[in-house]
């Protein structure tokens, strides 16, 4: 879930010598619109009732998805918002203007996008990705020019937007050597679980959960940071975003994860357990994936993903205006007022208790 440790978990997967990991992107959000309370008055009223009655576990089922237009889906995939995010309003507007009218336009689109990023493509002569050579997450800037063009063409030529997510996952997975375990991250994809299982039935799913109050504080800090840097997902930032809305969203997703875990559809771990018992928690993750989980491997991963290293030398608990923030548990007790803490507990009490969190 969003701001619940997905980046840390992805880095722990990337650091394993048998796994290639790609940075965050949700092709279902790019290709489809979810019928959510924000754009459905009936669902909004229902969500209010669920919130008032404390039954967020009733709010996560039966999600409907509607395909975007093919042009909108391609734009969401590549032109300023998704796999090739452009920071700054002007850059995003320029990127959106590059929408191809035909397949033959795509090579020029790829070149112009990378020129806007001031990035170079990966040399064409390099071989496929091999896990032991990469202990960090990969992204669009790791593509060869031919690969980016092929991926764009693959998405552009899909019969419908509903076909695009599987086409994306299939193509990017095949950039690695055969039989490589490939990890993808999408922090909010629990809401697309049914679609993901339809498209990739053999995929093993992991969800990391965190105390919703800590996630709330982290989200506030992150959204302010993204707003300042003019990121696509920070444009609508409002100071101290509505606490009730966030805790409702967290609670609904927590319920979905908890149910899916009980049904054996995914492995659920807690952010707090990664702090408390890194070795035991990651050992469980690696065993679930069927990769090496010996003590030496986990010790190596722990060293590579250590907070001080990934934060540029800061100690845990040291505040900074950075994507990698404090790296501690329970910071909500320092950041929320008593009134805010009481309200957060009231909204998502059932889910917090179910996941092992207490009121104080």
Image (cartoon, grey):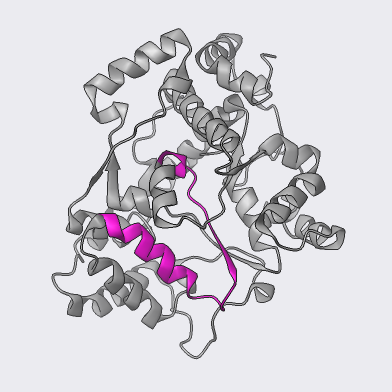
Q: Residue at x 40, y 14 (%)?
A: 50
Q: Residue at x 64, y 62 (%)?
A: 14
Residue 312 vertical placement versus 108 (above, below): above
Residue 140 vertical placement versus 35 (above, below): below
Residue 155 percent across, percent down from the top left: 29, 66
- Residue situated in front as seen by the camera: 171 or 266: 266
- Residue situated in front as seen by the camera: 25 or 57: 57
Counting the numbered discs, the total is 0
> What is the magenta range?
162-191
Residue 107 percent across, percent down from the top left: 27, 79
Q: Quick check: 157 left or right of 14?
A: left
Q: Residue at x 32, y 69 (%)?
A: 113
Residue 227 vertical placement versus 336 (above, below): below
Q: Residue at x 46, y 26 (%)?
A: 246
Q: Inspect this view and state whether residue 350 appears.
A: yes
Quadrant of the rendered image containing residue 160: bottom left
The reply to whether the magenta stretch includes residue 267 is no
Quadrant of the rendered image containing residue 302: bottom right
Q: Quick check: 105 left or right of 4?
A: left
- Residue situated in front as seen by the camera: 118 or 79: 79
Q: Quick check: 52 left or right of 314?
A: left
- Residue situated in front as seen by the camera: 222 or 106: 106
Quadrant of the rendered image containing residue 286: bottom right
Q: Which quarter of the rendering shows the C terminus?
A: top right
The reply to whether the magenta stretch includes residue 175 is yes
Residue 208 vertical placement versus 252 (above, below): below
Residue pushed farthest bottom?
Answer: 125
Residue pushed farthest left?
Answer: 101
Residue 231 percent across, percent down from the top left: 39, 49
Residue 258 percent across, percent down from the top left: 57, 31
Q: Inspect this view and state whether residue 93 appears.
A: no
């Amino acid at each position: 879930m969003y701001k619940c440790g997905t980046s840390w978990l992805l880095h722990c997967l990337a650091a394993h010598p048998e796994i290639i990991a790609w940075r965050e992107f949700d092709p279902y959000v790019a290709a489809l619109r979810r019928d959510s309370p924000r754009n459905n008055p009936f669902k909004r009223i229902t969500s209010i009732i669920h919130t008032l009655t404390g039954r967020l576990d009733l709010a996560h089922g039966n999600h409907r998805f509607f395909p975007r237009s093919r042009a909108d889906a391609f734009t969401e995939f590549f032109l300023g918002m998704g796999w090739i995010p452009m920071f700054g309003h002007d850059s995003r507007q320029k990127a959106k203007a590059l929408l191809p009218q035909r397949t033959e336009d795509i090579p020029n689109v790829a070149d112009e996008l990378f020129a806007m990023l001031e990035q170079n493509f990966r040399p064409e002569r390099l071989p496929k990705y091999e896990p032991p050579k990469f202990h960090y997450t990969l992204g669009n800037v790791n593509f060869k020019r031919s690969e980016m063009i092929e991926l764009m063409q693959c998405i552009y030529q899909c019969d419908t937007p509903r076909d695009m997510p599987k086409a994306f996952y299939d193509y990017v997975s095949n950039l690695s050597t055969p039989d490589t375990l490939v990890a993808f991250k999408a922090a909010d994809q629990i809401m697309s679980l049914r679609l993901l299982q339809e498209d990739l039935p053999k995929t093993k799913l992991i969800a990391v959960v965190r105390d919703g109050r800590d996630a709330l504080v982290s989200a506030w800090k992150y959204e302010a940071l993204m707003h300042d840097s003019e990121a696509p997902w920070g444009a609508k930032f409002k100071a101290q975003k509505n606490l009730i809305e966030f805790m409702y969203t967290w609670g609904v997703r927590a319920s979905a994860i908890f149910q899916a875990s009980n049904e054996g559809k995914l492995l659920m771990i807690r952010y707090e357990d990664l702090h408390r018992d890194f070795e035991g928690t990651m050992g469980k993750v690696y065993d679930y994936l069927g990769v090496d989980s010996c003590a030496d491997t986990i010790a190596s991963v722990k060293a590579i993903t250590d907070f001080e290293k990934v934060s540029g030398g800061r100690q845990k608990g040291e505040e900074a205006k950075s994507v990698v923030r404090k790296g501690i548990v329970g910071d909500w007790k320092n950041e929320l007022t008593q009134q805010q803490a009481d309200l957060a507990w009231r909204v998502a009490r059932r889910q917090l208790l179910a996941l092992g969190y207490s009121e104080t």
